[in-house]
Image: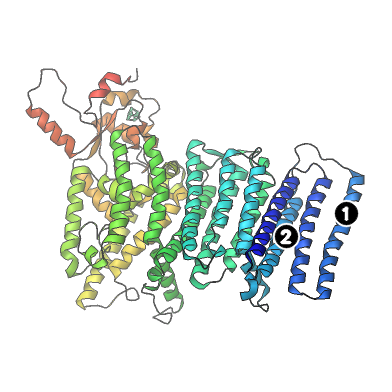
Amino acid sequence: MDPVLLAVLWVLAVAMAVVAAYVIRRAAVAASPFDVALALFLLAMMGSMAGGFLLYEALPVQWGLQAALFLGMWVMVFGIGQLLAELRGGEKWEAGRRPSLAVRASVIAGALATELVMTFALELASGDLAGVARTAPLGSLLAAGITSSWFLFPMSLEMALSVYLARRETPRFLLVILSLQPVIMALSPTAVPDLQPWLTASVVGGGGAMTVVFVFVMESFRRSPRMNRAIFDYLVLLAFVFGLMMAGLLVWTLDGNPALFAVSLLAEMTLFFNAILMPDRLSQGEKVAYLERAWPMFGLILGVFVAEFFMGALFDVALSGTGFLTGMAYAPLTAGAGAPALPALFNGLLFVTGVLASPWFLIMMGAEMGALVAFKIRETRSRETRTRLSFVIGAYFVYAIFLPAFILSPQRLSSLPLIGWSMGIGTGGGFIPPFFVVIALTYAIAAVLSLLFGARQMCSGLCTAALMYQGTFYDSLKGFNRRSTVGNKLLGSKLSRLYGVVFSLSWASITAAAALSYLDYAGIVHVTAYGLDLAYFTEVLYFNFLWYVVFLTIPFVGVYACVSSGYCYWGTFNQVLGRLGFFRLKARDPAVCVSCETKPCTRACPVGLNDLPVNFIDKGEFKALKCIGVGDCVESCPYENILFWDVRHWLSGKASLERPRRTGQPLPMVGEDGGRALSAKTPGPE
Ligand code: SF4
Ligand code: SF4
């Protein structure tokens, strides 16, 4: 098309967006019914002008022109009449009154309708609608319009301008989120669908901006645990809307249908403009301690997770192709008893676990959770914990993603102990003779590491769960270990009946799956999960599905429930060995614990181990199967009275015993500082 005409059309689109933003602002600060009527009238004027334009383009005949003019004039005359009537009335609202729901709904509907009519007019004029059959259903036409550049870019500008105009009365926290929404809207791949670099850049950029929103929201709870109810509701809704957007884009990428994405965009804009029309009201009212409310917090965690799930799937499809979806061993829907429901369920599970184990989902989760862990490093005193947290980030990316997903082929991976079998039996394949040596080596290496350093080598080191649970936000949910019914039953280092049941079921299931896997391999029985090896299927079910269920239900089961409940067979293997080995926590001076009044270490542990002081006072140390050495207790102790102790300290103690000591010099109590600094600086209770 003629570039001059194209430029004129874009100038027109931008001008409409600017005017619409100002009109919405007028409605937001309306001081009387007249102001609202004026805003609605202006929107109607713009809509009718664009409508007339559209009508004439669609029907380029004489009566089409007349109809277009009539449409524009009718709105103008009717609107002016109403305005004059309003001017005569002149009612004023009391100060501080904000637009009612009906007014907000009318303004939002008016703004969206105007923009949409304008979009179709510009699309027709630019020839972009030429490819869309005139006979296409209205829904398809609307979806095509809403997801086109003519709608998305001007609307993003309108949103950005609206945020700018409302900046003074919008709380800073909300302002950051509202400012990122237009960016996310503009980075829609559907806007320029034929340009591959744009597709890649917009998927990565849009997903990245959403991740920034989530990190910002989660980190804000650390700084201010109480939040205004309206803002919290906004965040939960926004998370689900983001999820819908990602799901819509996934569908569009897979089969070209933009309908779901269009619906999600309308939902996002409605949410956004509703906030813009009453930003100060969002920040008023009751503040709630959401870190103590199970259901609302579950809603937020779930909403964020749904968005991340579809974002991960979209990243995978957009950046690596559909191979990971099409390569799955789906069951035919006619297979076996219970068909088609059971095979459909199995296929659904395969899809979900496939996404949750895919490299791009893990990278995206890693970026988000890694940022929260990095925040935690900043506020951690203990050098040992800081080093461990840095190791957690590095291990996640290298050991859990980079090596298995980008460097090593599946065949090579299954021949490598520990890396290829990172969650024990089932990780790299069936429990079958070709893998017996590598499985045995995996367990032997893990056993030695746990004996020497405790289960923390796995559960707060190499395991991906360490990154998920130990960032600032998820760490701040550990109050649910005490508040939730299930979490409460799992508190303390004593193994409850519930722990016994879960532990037994977990080990019984993996043992049975391993036995059946072997028997199937040997040809003695033939049992698989629709062709998938049972040991492998069990591992996938446990760690790519159930683990996430446990993670999402933190408000009901507590943080680190994979450890506190005994649910993870790989974790409990390491924890038993850790219990038998060197690792323990030591009290520098048990007498300090006796006098300590608040005993904050009882509330610091993310696993819910609240009986440290009793053990310190009785035995001078704490050694528990469930202790995975996170070290939050060390951080929490105001007297710096807790020390990590493992094989390094045992060796160090041996070495110093062999060195001649001056009489009266205390035996070294080796911590990160060798126990030397504390005696000089710790005040100690009276
Ligand atoms: S219990 Fe299992 S899932 Fe949880 S941290 Fe330990 S190894 Fe990871
Ligand atoms: S906070 Fe420190 S001093 Fe107080 S009981 Fe716990 S370990 Fe002992």
47 sits left or right of 396 in the view: right
Q: Which amino acid does label 2 sit on?
A: Thr
Q: In which quarter of the image is the C terminus?
A: top left
Instruction: Please name the residue shown 41% across and 45% down the image.
Output: 371
Q: Residues within 10 Å of mark 1 (few under 14, many from 20)?
A: some
Residue 125 locus on image (x, y percent): 69, 68
Pointer 2 or 1: first along the chain: 1
Vertical comparison of 588 with 115: above or below: above
Q: Where is residue 605 in the image (x, y as percent from the top left)?
A: 36, 39
Q: Judge: label 1 CB < 8 Å from ligand 1.
A: no
Residue 325, how many percent across, how many down?
A: 40, 70
Q: Where is residue 662 in the image (x, y as percent from the top left)?
A: 10, 18
Could you tell me the amino acid type at mark 1?
Ile
Q: Does residue 10 appear to the left or right of 575 in the view shown?
A: right
Tell which of 511 and 422 is nearer to you: 422
Q: Is residue 271 visible?
A: yes
Q: Name the residue under label 1.
A: 80
Quadrant in which residue 421 is drawn: bottom left
Q: Can residue 489 be seen in this view?
A: no
**Would you call the spot at circle 2 few (<14 residues within 10 Å), some (14-19), or many (20 or more)?**
many
For mark 2, what is the residue? 114
Name the residue located 56 percent from the left edge and 46 percent from the top edge: 177
Dividing the picture into quarters, in which one does residue 186 lie?
Answer: bottom right
Residue 521 lies, with reference to residue 392, above or below; the image says below
Q: Which residue is drawn at 21% across and 43% down?
A: 453
Which secondary structure, mark 2?
helix
Mark 1 residue element? helix
At horizontal 69% and vertical 50% (from top left) the residue drawn is 21
